Image (cartoon, coloured by chain):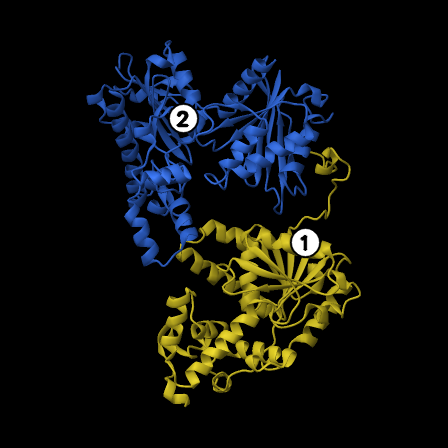
Chain colours: A blue, B yellow
Amino acid sequence: MNIIVINCGSSSIKYQLFDMTKNEVIAKGQVDKIGLHGSYIKHERKDGDKVRLEGEIVDHQIGIEYMLGILISKKRGSIKSFDEIHAVGHRVVHGGEKFQSSALIDESVMAGIKDCVDLAPLHNPPNLKGIYAMQSLLPNVPQVATFDTAFHQTMPDYTYMYAIPYSLYAKYGIRRYGFHGSSHRFVSNRAAKILNTYLKKLKLITCHLGNGASITAIKDGGSMDTSMGMTPVEGLIMGTRTGDLDLGVLTYLMSKEEIGVQAANTLINKHSGMVGITGVSSDMREIEKAAFEENNERAGLGLKMYHYRIKKYIGAYMAAMGGADAIVFTGGIGENACDSREEICKGLEFAGVEFDIEKNEATRGTEAIISKENSPVKVMVIPTNEELVIAEDTARIIEEIK
Amino acid sequence: MKMSERLSDYSLQKKIVQGRNGGLQKVGLIGAGGLGQEIIRSITRQGIEVVFIDKSEELIVQIMESIGRQLDETINKWGITGSEKRAILSRIQGSTDFNDIRECDLIIETIHRKGRGTSLLDRKEVFKKLESIIDTKTVIASNNATLMISDLASALSHPERAVGLNFITPVSKVGIVEVIRGLDTNDESFDFAIRFIKMLDKRPITLNESLGNISTRLIVTLINEACEILMEGVASINCIDDTMKLGYGLQLGPFELADRVGLDKVQKWMDNLYFEYGEQKFKPSPILKRMVRANHLGRKVGMGFYKYEHHKIVSQAITTTDYI
């Protein structure tokens, strides 16, 4: 069974074609700068054949047409006809309270995704465009939506509610939804496998540390709390986002700087976080270089803040769950930045974390346990694979309807 | 990779080929004065390229520098990031050669004339020149408040592609643009202009041509009546502005607004409207004319109905008795 996984952003489409029988990626690529000057498609086949083609790609529909055109072409393709695509899996960012799991796309699911546009005005519309395009190009192929928020729908009300008037929750659905759900789900399932037990028996703290970052407390097999809220700006300090911030600061700044909602949004989403503190970059590697090689004080401060915030959340989630069996690191920074992992875990011995510095330093981008053999709390590195989650969900749902 | 391989080789439908198919990737802009620069920023911020034409290489350098400064101000106000600024600037190309806009999907004319009299003839000349260079279907838009698009279109052999636009300053903050249909404008061109305005994340206000559109007709009468009230000694500038701001929720009072637009421009709008409609309500108030003669043109010169320092109001410039 072949499944194509699509992730549509505002001006890009990432895609992977999976052969689920052999459990491998046959082809993958990215359409970029859609509707902009210099639009292109980058495609890679499993045998290593690569191509980058520039041309006019005015919208998502045309981008997807070219992608399919390449996939069935003699020269660059991997399949002979569209009959070899058995299903399409779409990443959809926001599923609101409607979607607790991935869903076979029909009219009511489409209506549900549209209802969530208000909650994710930048993300859900391009996701919908991708679905429309696929429906018109491959009308007989079943399609499945996997939601970033779905995994966190197990959160109890006392962790997802904000302490604002209840009527606003009822009116607008303002509550914490959380993101990176597919990633937290993937690494928690992997962790259970590696630890040779059932996920339901574990208390896990999964840290997805990439350009965006979130941390999740997983208990009884599901998310019980996560650091991102109604939008992805809450929680950990990120590349360009504030993470947790006193709300009073925002209203004070809007008044002092005489800025409106739009600029305030840009301020907390693009000017803040690591780039705002350090003034160096939003890229962790550059910040570490500035801190360690150039003795840049603000870079050093940024790193301390970044690590402290994560450590604080780990402590909070341990308290919330009554301990933890493992802490899992994933995402670009979580998988590769051994200095950050060490700083975050330093001082957690009291809670049962016996960190193995040597194992940690030897681990970059690979699955490993980086705590000492008998550490009561295991520390793990597990590279995430959100596309695989979408492909597997799609395959499962397709099997069910057969 | 062989050079001969093209993206269009992989098109599923042969009709998708390289070239224009209703896409909007590049806009040509003629005359990059203050308003033109604001329009350039709004367009390029949405990822669309702009080629602007102005009179000399020297001027083009100045315009680029000016746009850079405006973007820096936006950064200082947290509106964009440094890398967004670089991306925006990379989409702007200045030229003195009309041939450089040949490939544009839409042309906007934003020339302005200093001093009295209308810019109609200058604009007509530009329209004619454009037609000799661009494709017969490329839409030509004129940005102006008090000229008729049909007048301008009469200079074209394909008048159906002429559309009127009216951007209001500050363009980055104003959420509407008037899109004006002339007598000959066809649906295709009109819809294209509407789509363009939507791409700028603004609401297009569609209307049939009428000198002064909606915005200018209404605002000049407000300013004129405010001048009357002032001239009659009824109330001070502050009181009149505050009444409209606090009483009716306008963001700016009529005098602040006039100062911001520029009193010379306000007078020119009124002259044009008065000439067209012959109605007293459009006849520029004597106060306004006196101030224009004295070069008290508003915020841009630091003196208008208010005195300004660093573009901020410091006091009323005139009291009622000065003019009675």
Q: Give the number of the disc on residue A225.
A: none
Frontmost of labels 2 and 1 is 2
Q: Quadrant of residue A297?
A: top left
Proximity of marks 2 and 1: CB atoms separated by less than 8 Å? no
**Farthest left residue?**
A350
Q: On the rendered structure, is A50 left or right of A281?
A: right
Q: Please rate how many residues cluster around mark 2, counting C-alpha atoms within 10 Å: few if below 14, some from 14 to 19, many from 20.
A: many
Give the side of residue B222 with respect to residue A323, left or right: right
- Which residue type carries mark 1? Phe
Specify the quadrant that holds the C terminus of chain A.
top right
| Badge 1: chain ID | B
* Separation of residues labelled 2 and 1 (CA atoms): 43 Å
SS at badge 1: helix
Which residue is farthest right?
B157
Residue A153: image tag:
2
Q: What is the x, y in percent for residue B151?
A: 72, 72
Q: Identify the residue at horizontal 62%, vertical 38% (top origin).
A: A60
In the image, what residue occupies the spot 59% across and 12% down? Answer: A21
Find residue B192 and name its label: 1
